[in-house]
Amino acid sequence: MKIKIERIEENFARVLEHSSLENGIQRFSYSVEDLAVRAILLEQLEELGLEIRLDGVGNLFASYNPLESNKRPILIGSHIDTVPDGGKFDGLTGVLCSLEVIQTMIDEQIQPQIPIVFVVFAEEEGSNFGTTMLGSKYWKGQLNEEDLNVLKNKDGRTALSVIQEAGFDPSNRECSFTSMNPAAMIELHVEQGGILEEKNLDIGVVTKIIGMNSYEITIHGTSNHAGSTPMHLRKDPLLPAAELILYVESLPNTYGSDLAVATVGKILAKPNGSNVISSEVSFTVDIRDTSKLGIESMSLALQRKVGELCKPKAFDYQIELVGKSDPVALSSSIIQVMESRLKLENIPYHKMPSGAVHDCAILADAIDVGMIFLPSKGGISHSPDEYTSMEAIEQGAQLLFDCVKELAG
Amino acid sequence: MKIKIERIEENFARVLEHSSLENGIQRFSYSVEDLAVRAILLEQLEELGLEIRLDGVGNLFASYNPLESNKRPILIGSHIDTVPDGGKFDGLTGVLCSLEVIQTMIDEQIQPQIPIVFVVFAEEEGSNFGTTMLGSKYWKGQLNEEDLNVLKNKDGRTALSVIQEAGFDPSNRECSFTSMNPAAMIELHVEQGGILEEKNLDIGVVTKIIGMNSYEITIHGTSNHAGSTPMHLRKDPLLPAAELILYVESLPNTYGSDLAVATVGKILAKPNGSNVISSEVSFTVDIRDTSKLGIESMSLALQRKVGELCKPKAFDYQIELVGKSDPVALSSSIIQVMESRLKLENIPYHKMPSGAVHDCAILADAIDVGMIFLPSKGGISHSPDEYTSMEAIEQGAQLLFDCVKELAG
């Protein structure tokens, strides 16, 4: 039983008709583009006769076979929202492959023992309110109405009011993680890194979601005129910041596992004038590893180094932990099912951690979770240039179908 | 004959009544605050019976003794505009001391042989249109109407239209440097550095305006997800940028004179997200020295280092020279007059270059120019925290008076 890649391709085309591609896609949750793509999906889900539900923030569930309390369903799906100037494949690939899995099941008149629930989580990228995986966190019960009333978009509007205006009622908890009581979720997603391409493979079997500590560091110096302040009278906070940027790059190799990464992605100097010595410099440090120990070792080394570098000239500084997530192990039984299918079909693959956090990771402390990765050309992600081949998508969708079929009996 | 510091203090108070002091002063040329301070000055200039002229961009001239073609005047003055979040002393100190010099001359019924022209140059700080010393450059003939039609403020409005709306006509060249044909200018200004404070002195005699090369460097890398991109597959442009920031700090000591300085004051990472490896990093390098050789040696070393650092990972880069001014020697005869006065009065002083460029430097290739510096507390400048004591201001104003009296015969 083969999934039909032509149908996935057609759906990509249909969705992208509603996306402004020039400077990348701006398909934020609750936007006009988001609504247009939801309409395309809903039309097909209705044609397939699925049982459709929307929860209080617009997470979309469509069940093949009715949800019954004694049959714990399997979730398949991902998200359709993008980052600003996003690409065509992040999120959408998993959604269209999951839809194809259900279409193939119906075509082939497969009657699973348990319901298969197609899911589209809202606001995964955090493009509206700065909080990633907002939809899955809400559904799981990690975010409530009050939290949504605190989060704001760029225009200063609360998440609560934007979501209510889109026609959803966050106080309505009828359709929750607890009430659906799923047994498992499998998410197919593009890798967003270059490992599979480097290994020339089309399939990644994800073993873990790596954990993260995210810091914001601010170093305070003394602003002054760049022309009239002699070098020996300066207290320029950009200098310890530059040393730290270089030190951060050395952290994974010294203190982390082979898979550890550390990044300074954001830097802001004040007042940021070409002829002014900075008064303060802020920058972020994003530290990730597959083990808690690795994350903690790198974090400690970072904190020690900030102190060391700021001491000689007595720079004031702050280190704030602004984000934290522990590494999550994915389901060994789902990994086993994936591996046996791949071996049976003689498809080479790579077992690997995910460096990014995904919707399914939010559920992984409570249910079995599996992830299939597809290669990202050049490792490029969150960019109009991201690309994943239809050949890889076909193999991924087929693996998803085979796993769901096996797990659903 | 003594200047009256109380009168200068009163004028400071009068001006600062019209300044919002909370987050620093925002007295940009052509703003409401600028007009209010001009009104205060004009009232006093009229009371003193001076001959007042405004040129095509609002530079203000007030002559004690009528301007006559056979008597080349001496200019004294500075500017009243501030940087964003500026302080109380930059510019304004020189303006109020110069006004006091003329008031004292009138009080003392001194009749100079040549006209003394009080001047307030417009738009010195470049706060509106990003071009510093716009007023003096226009007056000197270095900027014309066409240039003003290219320069734009933050709202996209041209300098030409803003200046016209303020009631000036840049095409009117009746009052120009050529027509006034001055013999000299003396500008009193706060040091904007910490040298006088370090030496515990109240007076600096400026010998040179140091020259500058200002660069904008952009390094292009590959943007990617900070979680899912292994360290060895990265091309992060922030890393060579950080090495260059540290290298720039070493340039003056290695290639410049004792007075050389080099600064990275502005840095912009794209897309500047905490979980994204940068696609490109731009930063400025401001290199200054008292000799052309020093500036050129540092500039060459910088360019060589950028190439060296970008080579291993084949980073693309651009180096653009965005600003350039040669070192300017100030008038040795004016310096001599200042020094003999200071020695006569037994006032300790320091001969020093100016690390910042000032309005008077624009005129220094054509006429005799002198500068008096007063100490900036903590070397702080372009900040609400800048401070110069009234004791220093009194000594500075007196020196200015004595020099003008001697030079004007």
Image (cartoon, coloured by chain):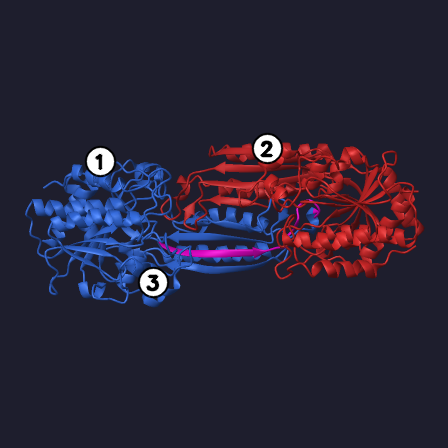
Chain colours: A red, B blue
Nearer to us in this view, A334 or A19: A19
Disc 3 + disc 1, Cβ < 8 Å: no
Image position of A386 (left or right of B36): right
- Output the chain of dot 2: A
Q: Residues within 10 Å of mark 3 (few under 14, many from 20)?
A: many
Chain hosting mark 3: B
Evaluate whether label 3 is on the same chain as label 1: yes
Tell me where residue A251 sits by quadrant.
Answer: top right
Which disc, if any, is residue B160?
3
A165 sits to left or right of A118? left
Q: Can you give x and y, in whole percent of width and height, for residue A257 in the image? A: 73, 39
- Calculate the distance from the C-alpha at mark 1 to the C-alpha at mark 2: 46 Å
Residue B41 or B167: which is nearer the viewer? B167
Amino acid type shown at disc 3: Leu
Estimate the spatial distance between the alpha carbons at disc 2 and disc 3, rounded to whole Å.
52 Å
- Which residue is depicted at the point 30% across and 49% down? B32
Query: Label 1 lies in what chain?
Result: B
SS for dot 1: helix
Above/below status of A358 relative to A365: below
The stretch of residues the image draws in magenta is B211-230
Where is residue B305 shown, x and y percent of the image? 53, 55
Asked if residue B224 is among those painted magenta in the image, a careful observer would answer yes
- For marks 3 and 1, give the one nearer the viewer: 3
**Is residue B7 shown in magenta?**
no
Quadrant location of the N terminus of chain B in the rendered image: top left
